[in-house]
Image (cartoon, rainbow, N blue to C red):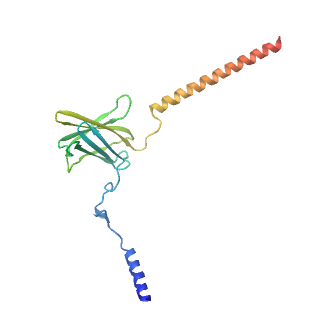
């Protein structure tokens, strides 16, 4: 009995030390830095005759580091992937224009349109994917955040300015009203 218990204890220690070198059936030595990283964004939408899914890798794109966009487009009725070319471009997501740059034109690769990108400055950008199917143009815009972006944008600045002006006007009016009451009280006591 003690021998069996000792054998079971010894076997459990041996099995605990067996470390897996595969993740989901792939050898650990073949994983790259972003192969098991979740996307920073995954959006599914329908545009015209297509269901479109796009993903951004790595999870937190940083300025000066290579990133990747994956786009899947399948026909709404048949479920077949779109088999054409998709053009990608990127621009600053600003109110008044901004710099626009063509990233590339990609063909389908195993049901996916993959487009690499490299952005040197932190900020908020807008990626546009365009393709033509059946003589109809399709355009998909989606946001892309690179690095740490300041939370103070044009809307926040305008809001802070408006609130500041309202506070200043309120204080000035209150002082003016208080000064008028004091002067009126002073006139009443002097007469």
Q: Quadrant of residue 14?
A: bottom left
Q: Is residue 167 above or below residue 108?
A: above
What is the total number of numbered labels drawn onto the structure image?
A: 0
- Quadrant for the N terminus, please: bottom left
Q: In the drawing, does residue 92 fall left or right of residue 160?
A: left
Q: Is residue 81 left or right of residue 140?
A: left
Residue 88, image x, y percentages: 26, 39
Residue occupying the point 33% across, 39% down: 142
Residue 146 in picture, x, y percent from top left: 38, 43
Residue at 36% across, 71% down:
19
Q: Residue at x 78, y 13 (%)?
A: 187
**Closest to the observer, 19 or 150:** 19
Instruction: Choose between 177 and 148: the one closer to the eye.
Output: 177
Asked whether 46 or 92 is in front, the reply is: 46
Image side of residue 10 versus residue 77, left or right: right
Residue 57: x %, y % from top left = 33, 49
Q: Position of residue 79 (x, y in %)?
A: 21, 46
Residue drawn at (40%, 78%) of the image = 12
Of all residues shown, which one is farthest toward the front? 77
The C terminus lies in quadrant: top right
Residue 183, compared with residue 28, is above or below; it is above
The answer to which quarter of the image holds residue 150 is top left
The quarter of the picture where residue 154 lies is: top left
């Amino acid at each position: 009995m003690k021998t069996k218990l000792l054998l079971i204890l010894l076997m459990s220690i041996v099995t605990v030390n067996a470390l897996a070198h595969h993740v989901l059936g792939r050898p650990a030595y073949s994983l790259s830095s972003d192969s098991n990283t979740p996307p920073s964004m995954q959006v599914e939408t329908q545009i015209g005759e297509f269901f479109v899914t796009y993903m951004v890798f790595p999870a937190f794109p940083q300025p000066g580091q290579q990133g990747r966009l994956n786009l899947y487009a399948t026909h709404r009725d048949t479920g077949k992937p779109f088999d054409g070319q998709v053009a990608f471009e990127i621009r600053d997501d600003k109110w008044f224009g901004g710099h626009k740059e063509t990233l590339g034109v990609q063909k389908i690769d195993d049901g996916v349109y993959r487009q690499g990108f490299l952005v040197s400055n932190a900020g908020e950008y807008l990626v546009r994917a365009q393709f033509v199917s059946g003589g109809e143009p399709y355009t998909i815009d989606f946001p892309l955040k690179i690095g740490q972006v300041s939370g103070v944008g044009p809307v926040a600045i305008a809001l802070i300015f408006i609130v500041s002006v309202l506070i200043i006007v309120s204080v000035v009016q209150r002082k003016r009203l208080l000064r008028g009451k004091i002067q009126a009280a002073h006139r009443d006591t002097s007469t």
